[in-house]
């Protein structure tokens, strides 16, 4: 019995040793789910979850708890994937991602810029999702304008997550004080200028005490150039920088500082910041054009939000359209990520209606999912409804693959115009030629 007992122990010991060796091999060669604990046990075998590293720049006290709640919900919803959230500052995240892609150790999923998906696709920095999507009808969940941003050679390399749209906020109380109809926001550029002049308060010393509106303070020249004819500055067809409408629009933008005085405007701007110090929230600016999410600052810092109205952007001319611009972010799988199948499953969860509705409710963002955007609970808020309605007027301009950094060629020319060193036609003609040359040089 003693000898038999010894033999049994030896066999058991060998079996355990071999099992350990086999388990070690499995761990190294196990492919996408190579973390399996392969202890013999048939249906009772335990499997470690595939771990995903999700990079975002959402580290604020507002956004971080929201994204981490969604991640926790996903982790609890199934038993095969575990997602870890990694926060990186906005200024660092994409530089570090590219370094990790080059090193062959990228994150599994990352939030990235919506306008440059094709730029990354052509540089082999993100993953083609066509095979992962397969027969999934995922395209139909997104606004078409946003889905288009994900395509390179007509194949998707990202899923849209959030977008934004520029709308016009106006202070009804100040409208009343200025003798304007508080229920009639300006509908054209001419009306905007006329209303703004009535809202202006200029001191006896010539200093601005209250400003009705000014394009470079509350909107931006590029918004008005795009608004004028509904065309982006650049697209796959080429630059549209010096169209007659855009030349007129840039002259119109400059006319405001000519009238009010650049020194006065600079002094006015220098006295303000954000939140309570934003000039619109402080009651020192009558009309402001901004992303719809600006409403959260009004809600949180303006004493009486019922004073504030929201409307689409005024039209350049009657009938030209209330054209607006937008941006946003997508979800991507960086090239070389180790678990693309599981990463795609997580991306589907993030862009499905429930997660998107939660993000929209908590952040007041325009989300990419149509069903979530039109959820009755969200639509009951008239400001959120106005933001969603304005998406039909909003274009998201994709940077063409042969025009990277085209802005660096336009901005100096526009600055020269606004400083009075060139006419709008001279500046925009030069910018048009420079961008056309860039696109010709990079033509494939």
Image (cartoon, grey):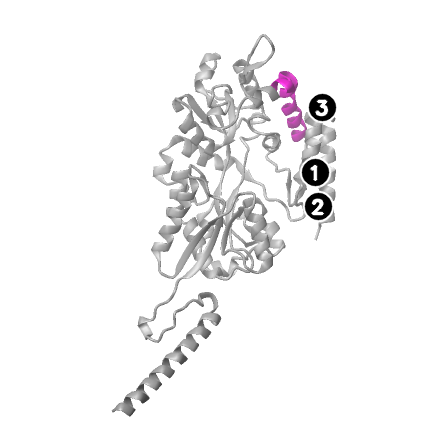
Residue identifier under label 3:
420
Is any part of residue 108 visible from this angle? yes
Residue identifier under label 2:
439
Q: Single out the mark in the foreground, 1 or 2.
A: 1
**Closer-to-camera residue (393/260):** 260
Q: Secondary structure at mark 1?
A: helix
> x, y percentage for residue 3?
29, 92
Q: Residues within 10 Å of mark 2 (few under 14, many from 20)?
A: many
Q: Residue at x 43, y 17 (%)?
A: 173
Does residue 102 appear left or right of residue 367 in this picture? right
**Closer-to-camera residue (350/17):** 17
Is any part of residue 242 visible from this angle? no
Q: Is residue 307 magenta?
A: no
Q: Quadrant of residue 303?
A: top left
Find the magenta span and give its range: 245-265
Rounded to the nearest whole Å, what is the CA distance between mark 1 and mark 2? 12 Å
> x, y percentage for residue 269?
57, 23
Q: Residue at x 53, y 23 (%)?
A: 272
Q: Single out the mark in the foreground, 3 or 2.
A: 3
Q: Residue at x 64, y 27 (%)?
A: 249
Residue identifier under label 1:
409
Mark with earlier residue (1, 2): 1
Does residue 58 appear left or right of residue 98 in this picture? left
Quadrant housing the N terminus: bottom left
Mark with earlier residue (3, 2): 3
> x, y percentage for residue 375?
37, 41
Relative height, residue 163 to residue 257 (above, below): below
Q: Look at the numbered discs 3 and 1 and tell me whether their residues touch, using CB distance below 8 Å.
A: no
Rounded to the nearest whole Å, what is the CA distance between mark 3 and mark 2? 28 Å
Rounded to the nearest whole Å, what is the CA distance between mark 3 and mark 1? 18 Å
Q: Residues within 10 Å of mark 1 (few under 14, many from 20)?
A: some
């Amino acid at each position: 019995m003693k000898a038999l007992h010894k033999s049994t122990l030896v066999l058991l010991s060998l079996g355990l040793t071999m099992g350990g060796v086999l388990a070690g091999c499995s761990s190294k060669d196990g492919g996408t789910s190579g973390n399996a604990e392969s202890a013999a046990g048939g249906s009772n075998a335990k499997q470690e979850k595939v771990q995903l590293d999700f990079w975002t720049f959402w580290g604020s006290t507002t956004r971080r708890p929201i994204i981490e709640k969604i991640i926790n919900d996903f982790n609890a919803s199934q038993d095969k994937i575990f997602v870890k959230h990694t926060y990186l500052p906005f200024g660092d995240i994409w530089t570090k991602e590219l370094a990790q892609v080059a090193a062959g150790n990228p994150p599994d999923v990352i939030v990235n810029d919506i306008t440059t998906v094709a730029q990354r696709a052509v540089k082999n920095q993100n993953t083609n999702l066509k095979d992962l999507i397969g027969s999934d009808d995922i395209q139909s969940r997104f606004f078409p304008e946003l889905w288009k941003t994900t395509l390179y050679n007509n194949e998707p390399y990202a899923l849209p997550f959030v977008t934004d749209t520029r709308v016009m906020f106006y202070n009804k109380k100040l409208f009343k004080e200025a003798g304007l109809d508080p229920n009639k926001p300006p509908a054209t550029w001419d009306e905007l200028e006329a209303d703004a002049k009535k809202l202006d308060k200029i001191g006896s010393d010539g200093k601005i005490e209250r400003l009705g509106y000014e394009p470079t303070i509350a909107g931006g020249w590029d918004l008005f150039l795009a608004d004028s004819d509904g065309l982006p500055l650049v697209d796959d067809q080429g630059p549209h920088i010096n169209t007659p409408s855009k030349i007129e629009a840039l002259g119109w933008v400059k006319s405001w500082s000519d009238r009010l005085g650049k020194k006065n405007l600079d002094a006015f701007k220098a006295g303000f910041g954000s939140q309570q110090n934003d000039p619109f929230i402080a009651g020192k600016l009558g009309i402001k054009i901004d992303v719809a999410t600006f409403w959260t600052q009004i809600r949180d810092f303006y004493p009486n939000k019922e004073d504030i109205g929201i409307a689409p952007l005024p039209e350049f001319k009657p009938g030209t359209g209330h054209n607006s611009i937008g941006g946003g972010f997508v979800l991507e799988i960086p090239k070389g990520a180790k678990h693309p199948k599981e990463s795609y499953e997580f991306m589907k969860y993030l862009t499905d209606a429930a997660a998107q509705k939660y993000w929209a409710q908590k952040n007041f963002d325009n989300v990419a999912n149509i069903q979530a955007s039109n959820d009755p609970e969200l639509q009951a808020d008239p400001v959120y409804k106005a933001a969603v309605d304005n998406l039909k007027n909003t274009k998201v301009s994709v940077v063409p693959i042969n025009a990277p950094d085209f802005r660096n060629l336009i901005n100096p020319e526009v600055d020269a115009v606004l400083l009075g060193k060139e006419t709008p036609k001279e500046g925009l003609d030069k910018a048009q030629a420079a961008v056309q040359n860039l696109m010709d040089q990079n033509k494939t």
